[in-house]
Image (spheres, rainbow, N blue to C red):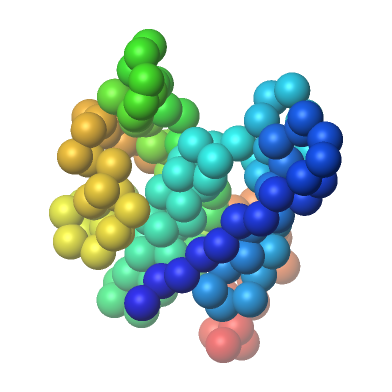
């Protein structure tokens, strides 16, 4: 079971700041644009989507396809409906993978598996939004990594 709790931080003030407690014991601030001290709840949906697909893709790249990934970033941008409940209507996901000899076919398959099979957050968001996914592969420019890899000294 997944659990969460939010609690108003300053009950006697007009501010709408909350502290969120995750079921696994982590805390973060929630706020609105006026307070500016924490993320808006809807932003956390975008963060959750980016994190969910990132965990899937990096795991698949490393464990299934044995890719040498040295850096990875996922960016999510979402458009919302104009009227409440302002659900996501369109989502752009961009994956940037840095590594040594990363195969495009492996990345494409990892992204597909995340979007179609593994990412629970993505499955929920896809109920209301269309996804547009892009990616890029950046060749790692760290020369000592390449030398170690070629010499077979890298684990």
**Residue at the spot 61% in from the left edge and 87% down from the top edge:** 153
Q: For this rendering, which residue is in front, 7 or 11?
A: 11
Seen in the picture, residue 78 relative to 21 is either above or below; the reply is: above
Q: In this orientation, which residue lies closer to the viewer: 113 or 141?
A: 113
Q: Position of residue 73 (x, y in %)?
A: 54, 48
Image height of 133 relative to 22, above or below = above
Q: Answer above or below: position of 79 versus 58.
A: above
Residue 76 left/right relative to 109: right
Is 106 drawn above or below residue 148 in the view shown?
above
Taking the spot 74% from the left edge, 23% from the top edge, the residue there is 34
In percent of the image, x 36 and y 14: which residue is there?
Answer: 83
Residue that lies at the very extreme toward the top in this rendered image: 82
Residue 65 seen in this snapshot? yes
Q: Position of residue 39 (x, y in %)?
A: 65, 40
| Quarter where residue 80 is shown | top left
Viewport quadrant of the N terminus: bottom left
| Residue nearest the viewer, comparing 132 with 105 | 132
- The count of marks equals 0
Viewer-proximal residue, 15 or 113?
15
Left or right: where 84 falls relative to 155:
left
């Amino acid at each position: 079971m997944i659990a969460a709790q939010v609690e108003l931080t300053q009950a006697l003030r007009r501010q709408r700041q909350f502290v969120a407690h995750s079921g696994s014991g982590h805390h973060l601030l929630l706020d609105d644009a006026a307070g500016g001290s924490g993320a808006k709840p809807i932003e956390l949906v975008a963060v959750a989507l980016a994190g969910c697909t990132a965990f899937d893709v990096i795991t698949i790249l490393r464990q299934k396809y044995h890719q040498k990934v040295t850096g990875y970033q996922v960016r999510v941008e979402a458009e919302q409906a104009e009227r409440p409940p302002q659900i996501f209507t369109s989502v752009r996901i961009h994956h940037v993978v840095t590594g040594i000899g990363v195969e495009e076919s492996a990345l494409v398959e990892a992204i597909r598996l995340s979007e179609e099979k593994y990412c629970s957050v993505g499955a929920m968001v896809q109920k209301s939004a269309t996804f547009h996914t892009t990616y890029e592969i950046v060749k790692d420019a760290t020369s000592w990594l390449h030398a170690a890899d070629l010499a077979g000294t890298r684990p």
